[in-house]
Image (cartoon, rainbow, N blue to C red):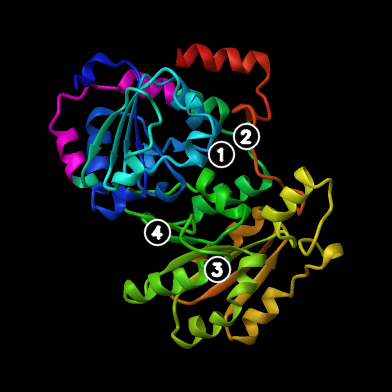
Amino acid sequence: MNYKSFRKPVLLVGSGVRTSGAARLVVDLALRTNVPVLTTMNAVDIAQDTLRIGMIGTYGNRWANLILENSDLVISVGARLGLRQIGHKREWFAPNAKLVRNDIDPAELSRNIKDEEEKHLMDAREFMETLISSDFPDCTEWKNRCLAVKSMLAKYDNTEGNDAVEALSLLLPENPICTIDIGQHQCWCAQSLSLKGYEGRILIGGGYGSMGCGLPYAIGASISTNNGIVYCIIGDGGLQMNIQELETVAREKLPIKIIVFNNQVLGKISEIQHGSCQDRYAQTTASSGYTVPDFEKIAKAYNIKATTIHSYHSLKQYESWLIDDRPCLINMFINPETLLIPKIKWETGVIMPLLDDELKNKVDELLK
């Protein structure tokens, strides 16, 4: 393919890139050509630092979905492009773009997303090596426009959850290892956790684990890096699923930094019960059968230093806790009414909430 014939290409990467050992090849191509890199949820750590634009999909960054929608070439590598990425009507996915798909699974490639898509059944590393050796265009001007849109919309959809994740990002060292549990905070992290350096890891639940996976992930990650520091970002519901593993953390003296996003509700589920079930809550809120213990006292019972803060603004007071060689738990309260936005509306493919007309026109002008 003559890639130079396209004005607005994007590289869309999924977790297959990491599995194949091709993550560094993505970084190398992006640094050389400035092609905008978008990711799926499970691959958000592949494009970080100066490469970070955002995640696509149902709860993806608004600007990332708009960039995808306005691109003229989508090169998808190691991403299965499931319903959460493309929506339930395939014609809504990158409607004006040529689609090039790489996947190692013939069953995934047997699904047509576009009628004239180009398919490459091969390992993602092999495909990236071929792509790097191709005559790929300089995308600097197009990427600058994408970054301008990102800057323009950076705070438009921010909730307290996003702001808390961004505040934590600023306190993390270069190339950290982060593990993310399941819940609203998972999406806030996928949207807003921005790492310094290109070698950091975000081990996210995705489709691989259920609530409670974040702490065991962190234990495994720490042991596998010779008792290295790991940042475990977890919700109050997820922590209660495997709270006994605090004993493992304490006994093995693992420097795991547990940051609890404590909104005192099962947020992801209660949000669905609010939006789709007319506030008929069941076992998700204090009034419907769900309660939360005092995590600070529990952590201290395991001889893990702990504190409770009532705003993410207080995180910086504990910056030293995040870099020492001891485990800790920071119990951080979040407003229980904080929702996940933006969200692509399933019935229409429209990103909600809507942009105001003036801002929408500015974005459209930059991406045309």
Q: Residue at x 78, y 70 (%)?
A: 291
Q: Earlier in the sequence, mark 3 or mark 4?
A: 4
Name the disc covering residue 346, or none: 2
Q: Amino acid at mark 4?
A: Pro
Please tell me whether mark 3 or mark 2 is closer to you in this view: 2
At which x and y percent is residue 216? 48, 73
7 shown above or below 117 = above
Mark positioned earlier in the residue sequence (4 or 2): 4
Relative to 299, residue 150 above or below = above
Q: Does label 1 or label 4 sit earlier along the sequence?
A: 1
Tell me the kind of residue under disc 3.
Answer: Ile
> Contact (CB < 8 A) between labels 2 and 1?
yes
Q: Residue sitting at 77 percent across and 49 percent down?
A: 337
Q: CA distance from mark 1 to mark 4?
A: 27 Å
Residue holding disc 3: 258
In percent of width and height, residue 195 lies at: 42, 49
Image height of 121 relative to 213, above or below: above
Q: Image quadrant of residue 144?
A: top left
Secondary structure at badge 3 equals strand
Q: Position of residue 252 (x, y in %)?
A: 44, 85
**Which residue was labeled with disc 4?**
176
Dot 1: element = loop
Where does the magenta region start and end?
126-147
The amino acid type of the residue labelled 2 equals Trp
